[in-house]
Image (cartoon, rainbow, N blue to C red):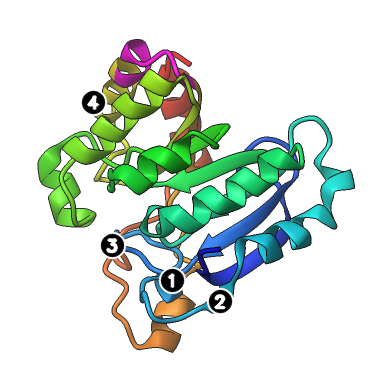
Amino acid sequence: MTKGFINSIQSMGTLDGPGVRFVVFAQGCNLRCGCCHNPDTWSLHGGKEFLPEEIVEKAMRFREYFGNEGGITISGGEPLLQAGFVREVFELCHASGINTCLDTSGSIINDDVIRMLEHCDRVLLDIKYATDEMYREYVGCGIETPLAFLDLLNEKGIAVTLRQVIIPTLNDDTESINFLNKIISEYKCIDKVELLPFKKICKAKYDNLGIPFRFESFSEPSASCIDKLQSILTL
């Protein structure tokens, strides 16, 4: 079995997919998003090693809380960097009747990722900005790969929750939401959209790591701002 590098585990999450989730935060990320909440997951050389069966054994302890919708979510960091490990975890989950969910920025597509998706029930996909320029400036990749990843999910008929962190002056406008609406209209796999308010509570992590928090100067959006943008969404 393939070993995975894991930053942390949340036994009963309610914000990382449908129902109650056993959430595994993978170590390592290929991106450097300005609004990242988990800079401690960036390095590929940290975390604790686990075998897939060890992860599933831990998840099984909470199975009675999953209900009809809950299950396991692998987040990060960027779990696509460890797609072989994720595939083995998801295979074991399906063998035990556990729902599987992937939380990703969709910035990596290769054979390991494609094989892993055969065992994935839902994807939480971040579409961070409406332009390639903003992606390259504030994320570290172009917009074309996440959209190609969405193409792949649509082809495979994998349910998608589209997510966007709302950051005032960057993507809190009608144009940004209309871009999401365009995507919603083109991809049948999308059945849910979540607008998440940018939060600066993560700054303590940056301070502890001695890393500058690039988005420290940006304000957090108000609840009314989120409500207004939510009202423009077509889903």
Q: Are marks 2 and 3 in contact (CB under 8 Å)?
A: no
- Looking at the rendering, which quadrant does residue 206 occupy? bottom left
Quadrant of the frame with the N terminus: bottom right
Query: Above or below — where is 209 with respect to 226?
Result: below
Q: Which residue is mark 4?
A: 175
Q: Earlier along the polypeptide chain: callout 1 or callout 4?
A: 1
Q: Amino acid at mark 1?
A: Thr
Residue at (47, 69) in percent of width and height: 202
Q: Earlier along the polypeptide chain: callout 4 or callout 2?
A: 2
Please tell me whether mark 2 sits on a helix, a strand or a loop: strand
Q: Which residue is mark 2?
A: 49
Q: Which residues are magenta?
A: 183-190
Q: Nearer the viewer, residue 205 or 121?
A: 121
Q: Mark number for residue 30?
A: 3
Q: Mark number for residue 41?
A: 1
Residue 32 % position (x, y)? 27, 63
Q: Amino acid at mark 2?
A: Glu
Please tell me whether mark 1 sits on a helix, a strand or a loop: helix
Residue at (35, 59) in percent of width and height: 35
Give how far apart the Cα atoms at labels 4 and 3 are: 28 Å
Give how far apart the Cα atoms at labels 2 and 3 are: 19 Å
Q: Amino acid at mark 4?
A: Glu
Give how far apart the Cα atoms at labels 1 and 3 are: 10 Å
Mark 3 crowdedness (10 Å alpha carbons): few <14, some 14-19, many ≥20: some
